[in-house]
């Protein structure tokens, strides 16, 4: 991690994101950081919906993402489950928010990641200013209600209609996205799951 402190609005010093540097589009192609065959890939929107091991290295060296020259990037999705201790969920929020704010500071438009267990959704929004409208989450066919909750959070934070993208989840998730007017992105993990970045 680079030793930098960013402005904060909370008691835990979780960085406050810069409203001026939020993503305005889901630039194509969408890519998953850490998948085989993407070492030479450039541009597009980069997501982190894969095993944490494949992208832990960005915490040690966040500048490494400049090598992939993203047009936009999402916050890393450090795994946070229902059984995750609140302190660990808070640390995951700190890491994703710090990385996001750092990437904004070097010119990368950002999506906020909403894919955390609903028991920790309140912690996940610390440092996200109201008026933020660029969100991404992971879809699961057996958790369609969770996607609707994620959208409600995005809508409430945006104060209107957000830019809301859903990664993976199959036919049921795709159908929900189409019916709601959300962006759906096919699962890229099913074709390549080994780290190569």
Image (tube, rainbow, N blue to C red):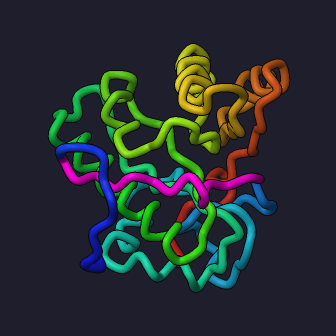
Is residue 142 visible to us here?
Answer: no
Residue that appears at 35% across and 40% down: 126
Task: Report the front residue among 51 and 22.
Answer: 22
Q: Is residue 20 magenta?
A: yes
Residue nearer the viewer, 4 or 185: 4
68 up-or-down from 138: above or below: below
Q: Is 123 a magenta residue?
A: no
The residue sitting at 17% across, 34% down in the picture is 85
Q: Quadrant of the N terminus?
A: bottom left
86 shown above or below 62: above
Q: Which quadrant would residue 168 be assigned to in this image?
A: top right
| Residue lying at 60% horizontally and 58% vertically, measured from the top left | 20
Residue extending farthest to the top is 145
Instruction: Provide residue 125's location: percent of width, then percent of height.
Output: 40, 37
Q: Position of residue 188 (x, y in %)?
A: 68, 54
56 and 93: which one is in front?
93
Judged left or right of residue 6, residue 180 is right
Residue 70 position, x and y percent, is 66, 72
The answer to whether residue 95 is visible is yes
Magenta segment range?
12-25
x%, y% of residue 150?
55, 26
**Residue 116 located left or right of residue 22:** left
Which residue is rendered at x = 50% and y = 57% of the image?
Answer: 18
Q: Main secondary structure of the magenta part?
A: loop
Q: Nearer the viewer, residue 185 or 45?
A: 45
| Horizontal side of residue 101 vs 83, given as left or right | right
């Amino acid at each position: 991690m680079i030793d930098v402190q960013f402005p904060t609005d909370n008691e835990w010093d979780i960085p406050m994101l810069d409203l001026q540097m939020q993503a305005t589009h889901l630039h194509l192609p969408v890519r998953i950081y850490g998948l085989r065959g993407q070492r030479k890939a450039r541009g597009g929107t980069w997501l982190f919906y894969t095993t944490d091991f494949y992208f832990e290295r960005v915490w040690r060296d966040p500048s490494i993402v400049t090598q992939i020259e993203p047009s936009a990037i999402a916050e890393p999705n450090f795994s946070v489950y229902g059984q995750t201790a609140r302190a660990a969920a808070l640390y995951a929020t700190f890491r994703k928010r710090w990385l996001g704010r750092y990437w904004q500071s070097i010119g990368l438009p950002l999506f906020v990641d909403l894919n955390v267990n609903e028991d920790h959704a309140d912690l996940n929004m610390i440092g996200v200013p109201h008026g933020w409208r660029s969100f991404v989450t992971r879809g699961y066919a057996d958790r369609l209600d969770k996607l609707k909750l994620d959208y409600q959070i995005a809508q409430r934070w945006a104060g209107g209609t957000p830019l809301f993208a859903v990664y993976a989840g199959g036919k049921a998730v795709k159908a929900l996205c189409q019916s709601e007017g959300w962006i759906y992105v096919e699962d890229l993990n099913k074709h390549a799951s080994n780290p190569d970045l």
